[in-house]
Image (cartoon, rainbow, N blue to C red):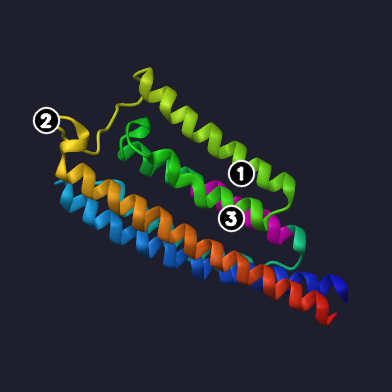
Amino acid sequence: MRGAGEFAELQSRILRTILVRRITLGVFSAVAVVVLFASRLSYKNPLFYSLVVWFLLTFAFERAIKGRRSVRSLNLVHMSFFLAEVVLITVLVHFMGGSEWIGNVFYLFTVLYANFFLPRLHGAVVTGWVAACYSGLVLLEAGGVLPHVSLFELTGPAYRSTSYNVATILAGTVGIYVVVAFTARTFAAVYAQKNRELEAR
């Protein structure tokens, strides 16, 4: 009975995080559209389409979660989603200037989610995968194996560029800080509900 209760509780929590993830992706998509226009990038740039693929991935993830029958399989599917997510983020970071801009920050939410919801070992695997993907991208670009893609075409110092400043302000204040606050509130609500369920037992 306890195992069944634990499974239902974990599945419910993961399904709630999928909704949070979609809201987060909606915010990032809006920021990406503004960045695309502010930076005068081509509408074919993967900056936007990677986010669409990422959003669609949540539906496949939701279906896989609903099809699981054990806590172990839930955690494995959840970890697999994070690993796939990191690959998509790395593609995004590559087209956003690699180490040139603030790309490493975009892994923040995956690491937070993974270490909050997954068992310790699985969280460590995801964190290690993030470190490997980002450092691998940086080294491949630095070594000339991958072509470096600059997000901004700057003619002077970055701090004097309107497109750079608008994109950085949006990515920082909306894309990072607002979503961090939203995520923290969500985690607090999940934790509070879990405590109430434990007290009720």
The dot on residue 164 is none
- The single residue placed furthest to the left in the displayed view is 155
- The single residue placed furthest to the top in the displayed view is 143
For this view, does 136 lie left or right of residue 167? right
User: What amino acid type is highlighted by mark number 2?
Assistant: Thr
Q: Is residue 129 above or below residue 139?
A: below
Q: Is residue 159 above or below residue 50?
A: above
The residue to which callout 2 is attached is 155
Q: Secondary structure at mark 2?
A: loop
Choose between 156 and 120: the one closer to the eye.
Answer: 156
Residue at point 16%, 35% (across, down): 153
Predominant SS of the magenta segment? helix
The magenta stretch spans residue 80 = yes
Label 2 environment density (alpha carbons within 10 Å; few <14, some 14–19, many ≥20) = few
Residue at point 63%, 57% (across, down): 78
The magenta stretch spans residue 11 = no
Give x and y (percent) for residue 200: 82, 82
Q: Secondary structure at mark 3?
A: helix
